[in-house]
Image (cartoon, helix red, strand yellow):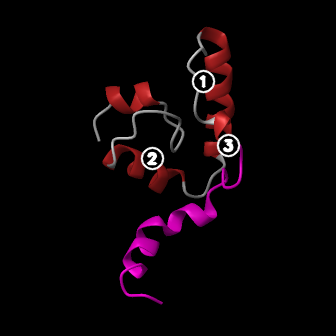
């Protein structure tokens, strides 16, 4: 294996075990027009998947460390990530 890519593979290795792997990203990321109850339902569906995910911790930490502005990561919405300390 190329020595330049090996460290990157270790950083991203958690993704291979993610419950959301291969799923449609629209479960985790809202369309521009989504509001209110529709958004709440989608976010709860994403949280349900994240609750059963073996890598929700690393996923959430990645989202915070890389300042992901959108989507549900590790069971937390963008607003939840912004409002709570690391």
Q: Residue at 59% across / 14% down in the picture? A: 33
Question: In the rendering, which numbered label is found on residue 31?
Answer: 1
At x 60%, y 24%, the residue is: 31
Q: Which residue is mark 3?
A: 49
Q: Is disc 1 surrounded by few (<14), some (14 to 19) or many (20+) residues within 10 Å? A: few
Q: Position of residue 23 (x, y in %)?
A: 71, 48
Judging depth in this view, the residue of 15 and 49 nearest the camera is: 15
Secondary structure category for the residue under label 2: helix
Q: Residue 79: image x %, image y %? A: 41, 25
Residue 65: mark: none
Name which residue lies at 34% across and 48% down.
66
Element carrying mark 1: loop
Q: Which of pointers 1 and 3 indicates the residue nearer the eye? A: 1
How far apart marks 1 and 3 lie (CA) works out to: 19 Å
Q: Is residue 33 magenta?
A: no
User: Which of marks 2 and 1 precedes in the sequence?
Assistant: 1
Q: Earlier in the sequence, mark 2 or mark 3?
A: 3
Q: Which stretch appears magenta?
A: 1-24
For mark 3, does the 10 Å Cα neighbourhood hold few (<14), some (14 to 19), or many (20 or more) residues? some
**In the structure shown, which secondary structural element does the residue marked by tag 3 occupy?**
helix
> What quarter of the picture does the C terminus occupy?
top left
Q: Is residue 6 magenta?
A: yes
* Mark 1 touches mark 2? (CB < 8 Å): no
In-front residue for pair 4/51? 4
Q: Is residue 78 above or below residue 10?
A: above
Q: Which residue is mark 2?
A: 60
């Amino acid at each position: 294996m190329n020595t330049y890519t090996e460290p990157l593979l270790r950083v991203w290795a958690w993704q291979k075990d993610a419950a959301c792997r291969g799923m449609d990203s629209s479960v985790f990321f809202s369309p521009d027009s989504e509001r209110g109850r529709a958004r709440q339902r989608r976010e709860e569906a994403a949280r349900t998947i994240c609750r059963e995910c073996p890598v929700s911790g690393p996923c959430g930490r990645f989202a915070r460390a890389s300042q992901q502005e959108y989507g549900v990561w590790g069971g937390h919405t963008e607003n939840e990530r912004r409002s709570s300390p690391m």
